[in-house]
Amino acid sequence: MVEIRKLKTAKLMKKVMADHFYEIDAAMKAGNPKVAWCTSVGPAELLRAMGFVVYFPENHAAILGATRTATDYIPVANAIGYSPEICSYLTADVGAYLKGFTPLAKIYDGIETIPKPDVLVYNTNQCRDVKDWFEWYARRWNVPCLGIESYVNVGEVTETHVQGIAGQFKKLADDLTAATGNKLDMDKLAETVWLSRKCSDLWKEVLEMATHKPSPLTFFDGTIHMGPAVVMRGTQVAIDYYETLLEELRGWVAEGVAAVPGEKFRIYWEGMPIWGKLRENAELFLRLKTAVVASTYCNSWIFTALDGNDPWNSMARAYTELFIVRDDDYKEEYFIKMKELFDYDGVIFHDAKTCPNNSNCRYGLPQRLQEKAGVPFVTIDGDLNDLRCYSEEQAITKIEAFIEQLGERQ
Amino acid sequence: MMQELYAGVDVGSTTTKAALVDDSGTLLADAVGKSGFDFAGAAEEVFAQVLKSAGVERQQVKRVVSTGYGRRNVAFADEMRTEIFCHAAGAYHYFPETLTIIDIGGQDNKIIRVNAAGERETFAMNRKCAAGTGAFIEEISYRLGLELSDLNGMAEKSEHEVSIGSFCTVFSCTEILGLLRRGAKPEDIVKGVFRSVVKRVVEMGAIVGKVVLTGGVVAHNPIIADMVAEMTESEVVTAPHPQTIGAYGAALAARNL
């Protein structure tokens, strides 16, 4: 059996992530600096520029998923009225909290709990569930919950969109000062936005290494290495990390090292990862000599619009331009552009039971894409965290049948 | 010189099937057995049965391809193919044209589109739910205390088919209890059950070309073919030996390796 090839930089990531969690834990214990929770594509730059240390509960929920503990805790949240049909990040995280469990305590010596925040800050650009999630904790701890109410189904991002969201960003800064006393330093904001942009550019470059044939990395590597882009963007640490990773990947490309030896097919993964089955899925594709070279999910932390010279408008644009915020016409064109870039053979749509906004197969998009651009597709049913919604045998059969189908075409 | 033969073994969730073909793809023998809990044993058993039926020795079988959920349990198989591949290959062999293959199996349904050249265009399977599958019919027959083999005949006698609207097997059972309470006749309920199966299946994907029905459920319940024809307004045929068409497709794959 062929083994998954591991990038050496993964070791550095363990340190980066450990430092991140210890920094937040120390801040919480000392009461300084103040701790802000932030949604994964929320206003991290603003929070850092205002002196907060920033914690991302979606990252914590993904760890619950990857450690296969999520499914144990989801029913706890279901029992207090949070439906099994809603975001399983939310239900896993709240359920784990109610049972006094965090995987962080197992991974990092000295960390006992998730960090209690001084403020919770969301952006609804990805969904309403993140706000509901943060509001649950806000009520529990009597902590302020503030945020950006984003547009949905956006076609072209217009000045009206940008001005509307930029206005909300400015008001959010004032509200954060009123709620916590932390003040905004505009020079620091410009610097943080530039750092975040640099991180984004490097992350994009990392992902585009998969345009090489054979690809040196897969979606499954991406879901691991995206950590710093999510939780450390806006810091030099993330930039240093991706420079190191890029160097290693460039070496692999130069030597022709393939993430999937004997790469025969190239796939685009649309939708959330199935965190509890990451390894199994990576091994399945390895066996099928298929490299999952691109994904909307990993691309979600590319914020090309960020510009330190115009922080408010550029943050507004960057966080509105995201795929998840856009309408289906935009999404169709996006898939076609990605096909040109990555030369993929087909798309796997993951229909995640509890994540409708990341399940883009529910309004006929795969069928339109096939008709318009001849892109073959298959849909698998599953979930990001709730393994009760995932039939592994059925998913394997579908994926194998899809690869057989692509083989017939070749 | 002894003729070279090829076999396919389809280990499904409920039944295990085998098919034996010659070099021309002609079916020489097929067999069906229960999958039970010993997939490897079930595979051995049906394979032995087809050899016996055709009166041939094991050594004459040049290659074996396994398929179905238990395809990895067939130690004597040379290669594996998915049941989606095999149903498409088997159906296309008999009907070499643009097809939509509808397979109603024990625990899953498939709808597979094949173009005129025999290449698969797309396919879908039921979601993680038994509604619309053989398991649904089994559950209903158990609840009503009826023999599975009697259902088709009963449904054909129905004069006032009732509608069963629930998506879920458990909810459908509750709905049926309500229908019985209101005095619905068993044959009308059974016809409603078949209709519900067909509704669940045809909503899985668009129909293009001729419809070929495969799987054990249509083999035992021909009323389903009439319903599919009526609801899709398409030409509908039931594949020859529909229950073993997957094993047959696997045998053809073995021949073509």
Image: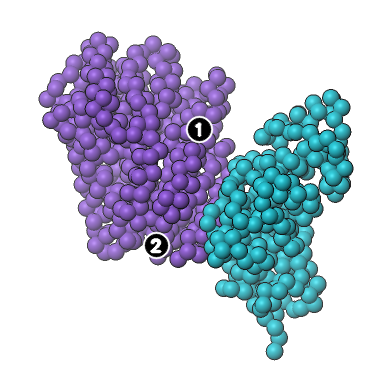
Q: Position of residue B17 (x, y in %)?
A: 73, 61
Q: Nearer the viewer, residue A359 or B53?
A: A359
Asked whether, in this view, residue A122 is left or right of residue B151, the answer is left
Secondary element at tag 1: loop
Q: Which residue is mark 2?
A: A263
Q: Colour of chain A?
A: purple
- Seen at 45% across and 30% down, the residue is A89
Determine whether the residue tagged by mark 2 lies in a helix, strand or loop.
Answer: loop
Q: Specify the farthest residue to the bottom.
A: B1
Nearest the eye: A251 or A373: A373
Q: Is residue A63 visible?
A: no
The percent coordinates of residue A220 (x first, y second) are: 40, 48
- Which residue extends farthest front? B233
Q: Can you tell which quarter of the image residue B112 is in? A: bottom right
Disc marking residue A354: 1
Question: Chain for mark 2?
Answer: A
Q: Quadrant of the N terminus of chain B?
A: bottom right
Left or right: A2 in relation to B251: left
What color does chain B have in the rendering?
cyan
Quadrant in the rendering for residue A300: top left
Closer to the chain start, of discs 1 and 2, is 2
Q: Which amino acid type is marked by label 1?
A: Thr
